[in-house]
Image: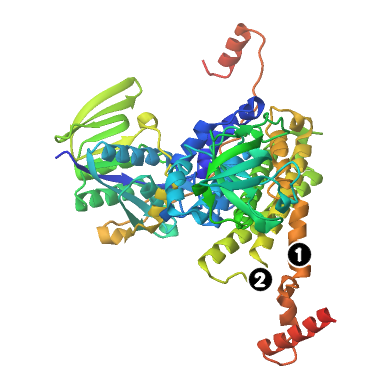
């Protein structure tokens, strides 16, 4: 009872420090040759899973990534941090362009059922699409409780987990029965540096490969990307001399 | 990972370490927890077991946070690797664990006031008396001097020249071991540099590394890797300098446009980026050649001796990268001169790379020796052989012809 089996979602995204550029055909952003890394919120999810294992509350951590071949590098990062095994659900580049949380959550739900998972932990959102939907949809498909935007995760080792959530009004603490889905927020933890020896060991670990069809999930596109554009350039502001001027200006612009 | 570590742990503090001349031992130990204390020491001996190529990549990444601290880390790594390679089981047991965890820091002591480039003529004497060696002499410019714990001291046990030199491990706190004042330097300020003074210093005979007379070999085997490491530090410094300069020139406007729009700026940046690439490739090639030699594979198709490759890459990278950083400083204009910006520190820190671990002039001596004195024809090019095989002869036959021809020319 005390030893949870954890599934962690690991999305490969463009590195947070990279300057994003739109492709000339305006159908997406440039990803060729650009530095990618593990989605920071997913990294926090992996870290939490590893900490739970260190506290002996988790028995097995399985990292999963959905996408093209390069996702294997993302899985190696998770393995180096302490995940026990990894599953790569392979999707070709073209399909990847239109892969949405609805597809991902179906895949995660199927894997959670197959792998007899007790706790699914994912990042609250990916830094490329900011969808903030995968955890929620996965829980719905599984019919499991969901605890999103978690800043604290405390399994009691007896079939429940207490989660502190960061919400607009402050902090909300809920208790739900496992199996459950949790999504990690920024302040849940600070991920460790993987040690060099672990990075090297991770290179040799086997990664299980699957296809969406193996899991009975249809990943055909449900959306069509019409265009991708840069946000409008910031225009220069205007200076005013006094508060009265400010109020007049704002009224004139219809802002108040 | 090394890059992230360096960005988070080194870069925010490098200015303060430089100004306060502070050795960040806590950060070094933190890095050791991640495996940075024994990078290319084999795993069977307690190290991280990276290849020289991976080590070079790691060091280049770390140097982008603080060149000076990374350089000390690389020297420490060189010392650990030397002990792991030449030490017997007892010595490894006694020293390696603490060194790999950086509980103890290693120092390399070859240079003396009268023996710099002329290292083989060092004067520090080691007299064997029963179970001890009594050491007398002075070592200068020792990185980590005063703070380090394990000193690899090259000393004379036998006659003149290289063959009379042995390598002894001297521990901090030994009777007769003292240090000079802390040198006041242009850069590398996060590492203390001191003279190591040996006055009837008693060292247990079991601290002899290898055997008597191979000390110079030990020193030179270590320094080949050390040269690739120092070159990698220079690469890291230049890489960061280039990135900062890109950011600055795109930001800074003069005459109504970013200075990155001016052709001079663009050409300078392009040239520097290209030069950096070529240096990096030279360093990686030397690192790979060291790995190949270690594993016994013969993919070194340039047939340039490993020691020459290391010398070439050290000379090229330290020289070119310092020059790149200098030109980056120029592009920063007045701001480049201010300590508020890291460029001047990168310039000061990398300047010494052209001098230590063998001056670049000595690098040229080594390269010339292999090139000219040892007549290694394939230095010149294998392509030379291929282009002349147009007379229908199968390749191997024509290359025989050429070899006969050229060796005849040389011997006449």
Which residue occupies the foreground of this view, B81 or B299? B81
- Depth check, front residue: A229 or A72: A72
Instruction: Work out which quarter of the rendered image holds the C terminus of chain B and state it.
Output: bottom right
First along the sequence among labels 1 and 2: 2
Residue B179 against residue B281 in the figure, above or below = above
- Circle 1 Cα neighbour tier, 10 Å, few/some/many (<14 / 14–19 / ≥20): some
Q: Which residue is drawn at 39% across and 38% down?
A: A41
Q: Position of residue B86 (x, y in %)?
A: 52, 55
Q: Where is residue B73 in the image (x, y as percent from the top left)?
A: 56, 42
Q: Can residue A145 be seen in this view?
A: yes
Q: Give the answer, above or below, for where B62 lies relative to A211.
A: above
Q: Name the residue located 64 percent from the left edge and 25 percent from the top edge.
A: B20
Question: Mark 2 Cα within 10 Å, few/some/many (few <14, many 20+)?
Answer: some
- Please state the horizontal and vertical placement of residue B147, each as a whole percent of the image: 57, 33
Judging by the rendered image, the residue that carries numbered circle 1 is: B369
Mark 2 residue element: loop
* Residue in the picture at 51% in, 46% down: B131
Q: Is mark 1 on a helix, strand or loop?
A: helix
Q: Residue furthest front?
A: B130
Tell me if I can see residue A32 in this picture: no
Residue A211, quarter of picture? bottom left
Front disc: 1 or 2:
1
Tell me: residue B399, above or below residue B281: below
| Left or right of residue B252: residue B129 | left
Mark count: 2
Front one among B314 and B112: B112
Cα separation between marks 1 and 2? 15 Å
A195 sits to left or right of B385? left
The residue to which callout 2 is attached is: B303
Q: Which chain carries label 2?
A: B
């Amino acid at each position: 009872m005390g030893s949870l089996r954890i599934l962690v979602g690991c999305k490969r995204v463009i590195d947070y420090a990279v300057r994003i550029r739109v492709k000339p055909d305006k159908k997406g952003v440039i990803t060729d040759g650009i530095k990618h890394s593990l989605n920071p919120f997913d990294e926090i999810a992996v870290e939490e899973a590893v900490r739970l294992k260190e506290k002996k509350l988790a028995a097995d951590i399985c990292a999963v990534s959905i996408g093209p071949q390069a996702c294997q590098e993302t899985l190696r990062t998770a393995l180096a941090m302490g995940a026990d095994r990894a599953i790569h659900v392979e999707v070709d580049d073209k399909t990847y362009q239109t892969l949405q949380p609805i597809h991902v959550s179906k895949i995660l739900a199927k894997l959670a059922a197959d792998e007899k998972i007790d706790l699914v932990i994912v990042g609250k959102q990916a830094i490329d699409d900011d969808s903030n939907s995968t955890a929620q949809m996965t829980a719905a498909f599984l019919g499991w409780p969901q605890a999103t935007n978690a800043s604290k995760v405390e399994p009691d080792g007896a079939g429940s987990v207490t989660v502190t959530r960061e919400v607009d009004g402050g902090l909300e603490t809920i208790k739900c029965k496992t199996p459950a889905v949790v999504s990690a927020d920024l302040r849940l933890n600070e991920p460790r540096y993987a040690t060099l020896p672990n990075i090297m060991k991770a290179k040799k670990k086997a990664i299980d490969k699957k296809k969406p069809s193996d899991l009975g999930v249809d990943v055909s596109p449900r959306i069509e990307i019409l265009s991708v554009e840069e946000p409008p350039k910031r225009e220069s502001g205007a200076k005013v001399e006094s508060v009265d001027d400010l109020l007049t200006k704002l009224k004139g612009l219809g802002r108040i | 990972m090394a890059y992230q570590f360096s960005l988070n742990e080194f870069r925010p503090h490098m200015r303060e370490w430089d100004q306060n001349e502070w050795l960040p031992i806590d950060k070094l130990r933190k890095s050791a927890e991640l495996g940075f204390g024994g990078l290319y020491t084999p795993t069977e001996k307690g190290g991280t077991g990276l290849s020289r190529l991976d080590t070079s990549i790691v060091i280049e990444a770390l140097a982008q946070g603080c060149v000076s601290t990374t350089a000390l880390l690389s020297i420490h790594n060189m010392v650990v690797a030397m002990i792991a390679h030449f030490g017997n089981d007892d010595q490894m047991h006694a020293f390696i664990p603490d060194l790999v965890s950086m509980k103890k820091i290693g120092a390399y002591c070859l240079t003396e006031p009268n023996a710099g480039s002329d290292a083989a003529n060092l004067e520090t004497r080691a007299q064997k008396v029963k179970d001890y060696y009594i050491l007398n002499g002075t070592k200068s410019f020792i990185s980590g001097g005063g703070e380090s714990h394990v000193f690899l001291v090259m000393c004379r046990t036998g006659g003149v020249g290289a063959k009379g030199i042995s390598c002894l491990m001297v521990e901090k706190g030994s009777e007769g071991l003292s240090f000079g004042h802390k040198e006041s330097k242009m850069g590398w300020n996060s590492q203390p540099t001191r003279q190591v003074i040996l006055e009837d210093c008693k060292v247990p005979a079991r601290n002899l590394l290898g055997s008597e007379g191979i000390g110079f070999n030990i020193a030179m085997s270590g320094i080949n890797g050390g040269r690739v490491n120092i070159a990698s530090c220079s690469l890291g410094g230049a890489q960061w300098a280039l990135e900062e300069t890109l950011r600055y020139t795109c930001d800074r406007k003069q005459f109504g446009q970013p200075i990155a729009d001016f052709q001079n700026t663009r050409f300078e940046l392009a040239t520097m980026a290209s030069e950096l690439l070529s240096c990096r490739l030279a360093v990686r090639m030397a690192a790979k050649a060291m790995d190949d030699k270690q594993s016994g594979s013969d993919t070194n198709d340039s047939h340039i001796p490993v020691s020459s490759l290391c010398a070439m890459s050290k000379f090229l990278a330290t020289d070119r990268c310092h020059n790149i950083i200098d030109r980056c400083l120029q592009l920063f204009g007045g701001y480049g001169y201010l300590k508020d910006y890291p460029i001047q520190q990168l310039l000061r820190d990398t300047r010494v790379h052209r001098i230590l671990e063998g001056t670049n002039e000595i690098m040229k001596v080594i390269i010339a020796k292999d090139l000219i004195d040892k007549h290694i024809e394939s230095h010149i090019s294998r392509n030379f052989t291929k282009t002349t095989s147009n007379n229908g002869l199968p390749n191997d036959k024509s290359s025989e012809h050429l070899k006969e021809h050229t060796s005849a020319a040389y011997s006449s």
